[in-house]
Image: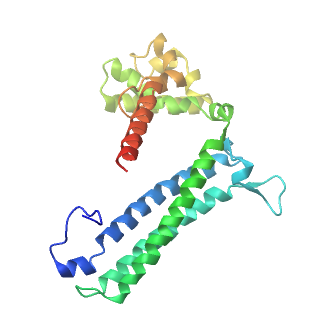
Amino acid sequence: TELDFASISFNSMDAVSERDFVVEFLSMATLMMIHLSKMAEDLIIYSTSEFGFLTFSDAYSTGSSLMPQKKNPDSMELIRSKAGRVFGRLAAMFMVLKGLPSTYNKDLQEDKEAVFDVVDTLNAVLQVATGVISTLQIHKENMEKALSPEMLSTDLALYLVRKGMPFRQAHAASGKAVRLAESKGVTINNLSVDDLKSISPLFGSDVSQVFNIVNSVEQYTAMGGTAKSSVTAQIEQLRELMKRHKEQA
């Protein structure tokens, strides 16, 4: 009780040789870093001139040594690389454990270096990631320019489903609409009602309401959906989860 352990170990060999807790920690750390690496890659892609969805703060990026117009997302690239470092520590620990007999050996000293290095790495990465997110400049106008009516082809199929058509047939009808628009050299929202009726008589004048990005986003109100109310609920749930973890720490 003086060391604040929940209970004693019931097997002396297990007490001195098991390092499951080290592997579990390194495994959780690796999963965390994989998620952070994916986030970093997303942000790097969205910061390119091809997308232009966001800009990193100067505090978390550097200028190119050759190209004056280039801004390097160094912070995100380093976070992405650290995921490999942490996973390497986990893999190395597995290799140490797999060759040991069922008792203590000096090989187990390797667990200290792995744990201490990963703790330091996580602390640094989380600080940088927090700083990057809090200082991101979001370019909403560029995101809106990247939207296209073809993104709503599934909504066109769902429109037919609401009219009573089975989804398999509705999916095929939507595909025909996409191909018809391509053959005419227009976007799908510029097809006339007569064009759409030639594919299915279920299309009516109200089909124009389908080609509205905001309406499309807001219609998915179920848990995990894209509607603002759903996203807000997800954020609140995560905040509550973080609060509970903080209270238990």
Q: Residue furthest front?
A: 2
Residue 9 at what x, y percent from top left?
19, 72
Task: Tell how many labels.
Answer: 0
In this image, 129 relative to 19: left or right?
A: right
Q: What is the quadrant of residue 134 in the picture?
A: top right
Nearer to the camera, 81 or 163: 81
Give the answer, above or below, for where 187 lies relative to 100.
above
In this image, 140 relative to 6: left or right?
A: right
Give the answer, above or below, for where 38 lies relative to 240.
below
Residue at the image point whose x is 41% and y is 30% from the top: 233
Q: What is the quadrant of residue 192 in the picture?
A: top right
Residue 52 at what x, y percent from top left?
69, 42
State the quadrant of the N terminus: bottom left
Give the answer, above or below, for where 10 lies relative to 151.
below
Residue 243 at what x, y percent from top left?
40, 40
Q: Residue furthest top?
A: 205
Residue 161 visible? The answer is yes
Q: What is the quadrant of residue 110 in the picture?
A: bottom left
Nearer to the camera, 142 or 40: 40
Residue 47 at what x, y percent from top left?
66, 47
Residue at the image point whose x is 43% and y is 63% from the top: 30
Nearer to the camera, 99 or 198: 99
In this image, 133 relative to 168: left or right?
A: right
Q: How is the image coloured?
A: rainbow
In this image, 21 relative to 146: left or right?
A: left
Residue 41 visible? The answer is no
Nearer to the camera, 23 or 83: 23
Residue at the image point whose x is 52% and y is 57% from the top: 37
